[in-house]
Amino acid sequence: MKGRRRAGVIAVAAAAAPLLLAGCTGKPARIAQAPAPAVAITPAANSTNVPVSAEIGAVVTGGKVTEVTLTDATGARVAGVMRADGSSWLPDAALKHKQSYTAQVTAVSDKGRSTTQTATFTTMGKPQSRNETTLYLGSGRTYGVAMPVTIGFEKGVPKQARAQVQRRLFVTTDPPQPGLWHWEKDGKQVYYRAPDFWRPGTKINVRAALGGLPMGDGSYGDVDHAESATIGNKVTLEIDNKTKLMSVYKDDKLARKIPVSMGKPSTPTSSGKMVIMEKHDYTTFDTRGEPNGGYVVDVEDAQRLTWGGEFIHSAPWSVGDQGYVNVSHGCTNVSPANADWLMKVTHVGDLVTIKGTEVKLDPGNGWTAWDMSWDEYIKGSALPVPDELRAAPQPAPTAAPTGAPSAAPTGSPTAAPTGAPSAASTGAAPADGDGE
């Protein structure tokens, strides 16, 4: 009996074995894989008439962009860089008109799955309406500490287009000194400056990627601009109508007091904070056809302060009036010797402050980026202002004058690099320059 019972146990066990094996060899349960990222490229595939300012954008779901390439119709790769915020990829130069390009974008998910999408598009032909642009900064030149990076537009950029234009303006400085762009109301000038003056020795690199950029009203930017410059030592000029004296400070120390004669009451000099814009060893003021003008006069050692034609310049005909009475048509007259000395000391980009005259400086009449408070200045940005740039800067301490040198030139100061804007003014200067 014991033997039969044992056999029965073995038989039951054997019968159960196939069931266990069947359970072990069945299909395993599926583990769901993370989806690959979804990528949508702009310009979209098969787009035509794309502006040559196009950037490669990508809307990614479930991942982030890891690589962007752009090739032309020959397969040559276009150089470019991703924006710092990752919003798009920007070519190093404007694309060519009526050309085919292929963008390829790769995105990777946090699980390591990748997707690569391509899109081929064609750029537009040359536009009929172009907005001529000027970057008033020249590579290899040295400028004053108040030099605003200034871009001029032949046609005013309408408000609705200013944000996209501003996004194409890039400034880097070494050492770093963050700043902000400010638009004049008519859209014909935009300035970039920091809350305080540039530090002497600062290197400034500017790229205005404006070639082919839509600027509103059917107009497109003419060319890209890229320039690099250096900031020189600090020089500032203060002109007081009450005393008829100009105080010249070098590195916050009084270097010289110079007698001046400014605009007479019928043609007054503007009061405000302006910047030296141009320097001419020799030029001609031709005011024929202008209000209060009608004369032609040759002048030496002329330094432009406004678009309207206010200069500091040599005026041998008014030396007897300098320091006593205003006789000019709006310019600041100085003696030939003092004008020559100033030309050797100043830079394009030095701040000139004039006070006590009958009229105020008009916004945009020159590079007027400093003729407003920082709170006013930041209101001119077409893009949101970063929090760290909202606070107004503390005023820099001004060194006490160290003596009062005589008005007559003494010694021969070393000439500092003068610099000149990229759009040089040669020949006749615009009215209302001073004359006899």
Image (cartoon, grey):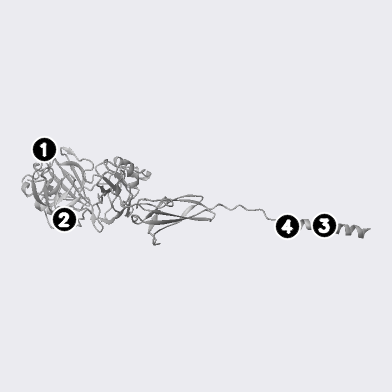
The reply to whether callout 4 and callout 3 are in contact (CB within 8 Å) is no
| Residue of label 3 | 15
**Which amino acid type is shown beneath numbered disc 3?**
Ala
The reply to whether callout 3 and callout 2 are in contact (CB within 8 Å) is no
Corner quadrant of residue 390: top left
| Residue of label 4 | 24
Spatial separation of the CA atoms under disc 3 and disc 2: 110 Å
Neighbour tally class for label 2: few under 14, some 14-19, many 20 plus, Cα within 10 Å: some
Spatial separation of the CA atoms under disc 4 and disc 1: 106 Å
Q: Earlier in the sequence, mark 4 or mark 3?
A: 3
**Which amino acid type is shown beneath numbered disc 1?**
Ser
Q: Earlier in the sequence, mark 1 or mark 3?
A: 3
Q: Earlier in the sequence, mark 4 or mark 1?
A: 4
Spatial separation of the CA atoms under disc 2 and disc 1: 32 Å
- Residue at 66% x, 53% y: name it: 29
**Which amino acid type is shown beneath numbered disc 4?**
Cys
SS at mark 2?
Answer: helix
| Residue of label 1 | 266
Pick the front one: 428 or 259:
428
Q: Earlier in the sequence, mark 2 or mark 1?
A: 1
| Residue of label 2 | 344
Q: Nearer the viewer, mark 3 or mark 2?
A: 3
The reply to whether callout 4 and callout 1 are in contact (CB within 8 Å) is no
Q: Nearer the viewer, mark 4 or mark 1?
A: 4
Which quadrant does the N terminus fall into?
bottom right
Spatial separation of the CA atoms under disc 4 and disc 3: 16 Å
Q: Earlier in the sequence, mark 3 or mark 2?
A: 3
